[in-house]
Image: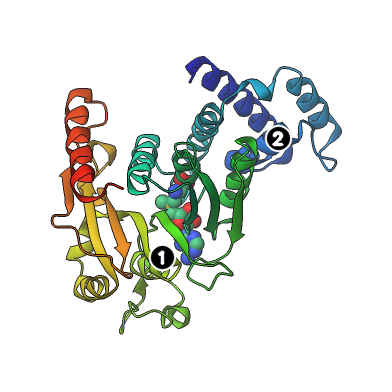
Amino acid sequence: MDHKHVEELFEWIDEAATAIEYQENSTYLEAVAGALDVLFHHAPFDDMADLLKQQLEKHLKDIELNKYEKEEIRKATQLAILKGMKGATQQQHLITPDTVAMFMGYLTQRLFPGEKELRIFDPACGTANLLTAVLNQLDKKVAAYGSDVDETLMKLALANANLQKSEIEFFHQDSLRPFLLEPVDFVLADLPVGYYPDDVQAKEFTLHAEEEHSYSHHLFIEQGLRYTKPGGFLMFIIPNFLFESDQAQQLNEFLREHAHIFGMLQLPESLFKEEKHAKSILILQKKGEGTKTPKEALLAKLPSFKNHTAMADILGQINQWFEKNHSS
Ligand code: SAM
C-alpha cells in the first residue's frame, strides 16, 4: 500500500466534497457520499447545478481511479468520513477505527482457516469500513451482506463498496426487524450501544427488558445469533461493561444456552477517550452439532497497536491459542 496514493485520493475526495457541500448546502458527510458517487461514475449528476458540474468535470480530469488498490481506496474514504464525523454528528455516527478493523480481519482469517467460501453479515455496517477491511483480508470467495438504519451512512457504505469493487448486498433498515436472509457463516458488528426505542419490536427478543427500554446491544447479539448457521461464528465489538450491567445475568444465561464463548480481547484503552467507553472484541460460536466450548477461552488485553514489540508478542500467543484450540 502506498501512503502517497491514500493522501492523494483523500485530497481529491475532500476537494470534491467541499465543492458539493458549498454548492448544495449539504453537510460535509453527505457531500463525501456524493463525491464518492461522482468518482465511481466518473461524471457529475444530472441534477447538479451547472457550475458544480463544471467544477467536478474539471476535477475528474485529475484522477485515475484504476491506479488505486482497494485498501488505498478504503483508507482515503475513511479519512474523508472521519473528517465529516469530527465533532459534528451524533454519538452513533461512529466509524470502526482502522487498526481494530484490520485486527478483526486477521481474527476472521484465523476463525475460518480451511473454508474456501464464506457468507458474512454485518447488521450494523455503518460506512462499511469494518466490513470491507475484513473482506479485503480474506483469501476466500465471500458473499457479504450489510445493514444499517442510517441513510447517510448507507449512502457512504454503498459508494465505499462500489469504489472498492466489493460486492456487498445492503439492507437499509432497522436491523432488529426481520431480514430476507438465509443464516450466514459469520456475523460481525461493531455494536451500537444504548437503548432500543421500539419497545413493541423488542418483545420479539428473549433479551428484551421487562420494565424499561431494552439494550440494543443485547438485542443485536440475539439477532446476530438468529442469522448465524449452527456452528457458525460471531464477532462483536462490545462495551467492556457488557457482562456487568443490570441485565447481564439474562444475557449470560441466554449465551450459555445458545453459544460457546470463544474469546474476549480487550482493546487498548488508548483508543478510547474515556475508560467507561472502552471496548472489547467478543468471539462466539453458535451451538450446533458437534460444537463444544474450547478448553480455555482466548482471553487477552491488547497492548497499544503502536507498540510493535508487545503486539508481536500477543499475536504470537493468539496464534498459539488458535493452533491448540482451533486449527483445521
Ligand atoms: N462498523 C461501522 C463502520 O465501520 O462504519 C460502524 C458501526 S457503528 C459503531 C454502529 C452502527 O449501528 C451505526 O452505524 C448505527 O447507525 C447503527 N445502528 C444503530 N441502531 C441500529 C438499528 N436498530 N438498526 C440498524 N443499524 C443500527
Quarter holding residue 232 = bottom left
Q: Is residue 25 above or below residue 148?
A: above
The vertical placement of 206 against 230, above or below, is below
Marks 2,1: beta carbons within 8 A? no
Q: Establish if 245 lies above or below 124.
A: below
Depth check: 220 or 168 in front?
168
Instruction: Tell me: 147 left or right of 42.
Output: left
Query: Dot 2: what SS?
Result: helix
Cα–Cα gap, marks 2 and 1: 32 Å
Question: Which residue, as the protein is rendered here, is positioned at the far left?
Answer: 296
Name the residue rendered at 26%, 31% in the picture: 305
Picture quadrant of residue 255: bottom left
Q: Earlier in the sequence, mark 2 or mark 1?
A: 2
Front residue of 126 and 169: 169
Q: Which percent across, then down, holds residue 223?
A: 42, 69
Give me the residue at 27% from left, 46% from top. 327
Q: Which residue is mark 1?
A: 224
Is 288 displayed left or right of 301 in the figure? right
Q: Secondary structure at mark 1?
A: helix
Q: Which residue is mark 2?
A: 40
Q: Residues within 10 Å of mark 1 (few under 14, many from 20)?
A: many
> What amino acid is labelled 2 in the image?
Phe
Does the image show residue 231? yes
Q: Is residue 120 above or below residue 272?
A: below
Provide residue 27's location: percent of width, then percent of height. Answer: 61, 42
The residue closer to the viewer here, 120 or 30, is 120
Q: Position of residue 279 (x, y in %)?
A: 26, 49
Residue kind at label 1, given as amino acid type: Gly
